[in-house]
Image (cartoon, rainbow, N blue to C red):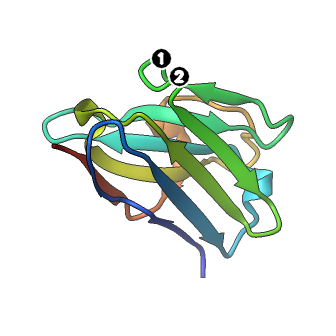
């Protein structure tokens, strides 16, 4: 029953926008720090954004600051990533993930996350 399911990816032109959703089931994401990561072909998985479970503090990678916004709807058990002003270099598979149980603070270190969604493809191209 435990799942993280990403959705909302697709093909968009440079400068366009997408909103990704990460729907959790089998656990309450309000008890976990939830991160968005992305991985482009031939590159390592990198942290994009994270929202903590404790105080709701938010972190963004420098490459997406001012363009991406992470948010959480506890009632819907869903985390969102609003992506604006998309660039070709944003092209990647985007994953949401939860940190280890009891680890409520954000980190961009992927091994500290214990469960991952299947990913959703984002392609930014003219």
Circles 1, 2 touching at the beta carbon (< 8 Å) = yes
Which percent across, then down, holds residue 102?
A: 76, 45
Most extreme residue toward the bottom is: 1
Tell me the tag on residue 31: none
Q: Residue at x 50, y 52 (%)?
A: 96
State the residue in front, 1 or 36.
Answer: 36
For residue 124, above or below residue 107: below
Q: Which residue is labeled 1 in the image?
A: 62
Q: Residues within 10 Å of mark 1 (few under 14, many from 20)?
A: few
For residue 96, above or below residue 109: below
Q: Seen in the image, is 124 located left or right of residue 107?
A: left
State the residue in front, 110 or 72.
Answer: 72
Q: Seen in the image, is 29 located left or right of residue 47?
A: right
Which quarter of the rendered picture does the N terminus lie within?
bottom right
Q: Seen in the image, is 29 located left or right of residue 122?
A: right
Q: Residue at x 79, y 55 (%)?
A: 30
For residue 100, above or below residue 7: above
Tell me the element at label 2.
loop
Which percent across, then down, holds residue 4?
A: 54, 66
Which percent across, then down, holds residue 110?
A: 45, 37
Which percent across, then down, holds residue 7?
A: 45, 66
- Give residue 44's quadrant in the image: top left
Tell me the element at label 1.
loop
Q: Residues within 10 Å of mark 2 (few under 14, many from 20)?
A: few
- Give residue 126's quadrant in the image: top left
Q: CA distance from mark 1 to mark 2?
A: 5 Å
Q: Residue at x 55, y 60 (%)?
A: 21
Q: Seen in the image, is 53 located left or right of residue 9?
A: right
Question: How many callouts does the rendering have?
Answer: 2
Most extreme residue toward the top is: 62
Tell me the tag on residue 65: 2
State the residue in front, 103 or 82.
Answer: 82
């Amino acid at each position: 029953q435990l799942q993280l399911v990403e959705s909302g990816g697709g093909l968009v032109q440079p400068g366009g926008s997408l909103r990704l959703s990460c729907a959790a089931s089998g656990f309450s994401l309000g008890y976990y720090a939830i991160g968005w990561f992305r991985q482009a072909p031939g590159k390592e998985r990198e942290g994009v954004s994270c929202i903590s479970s404790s105080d709701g503090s938010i972190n963004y990678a420098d490459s997406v600051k001012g363009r991406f916004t992470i948010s959480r709807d506890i009632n819907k058990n869903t985390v969102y990533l609003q992506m604006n002003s998309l660039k070709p270099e944003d092209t990647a598979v985007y994953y949401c993930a939860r940190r280890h149980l009891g680890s409520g603070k954000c980190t961009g270190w992927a091994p500290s996350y214990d469960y991952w969604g299947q990913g959703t493809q984002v392609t930014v191209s003219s």
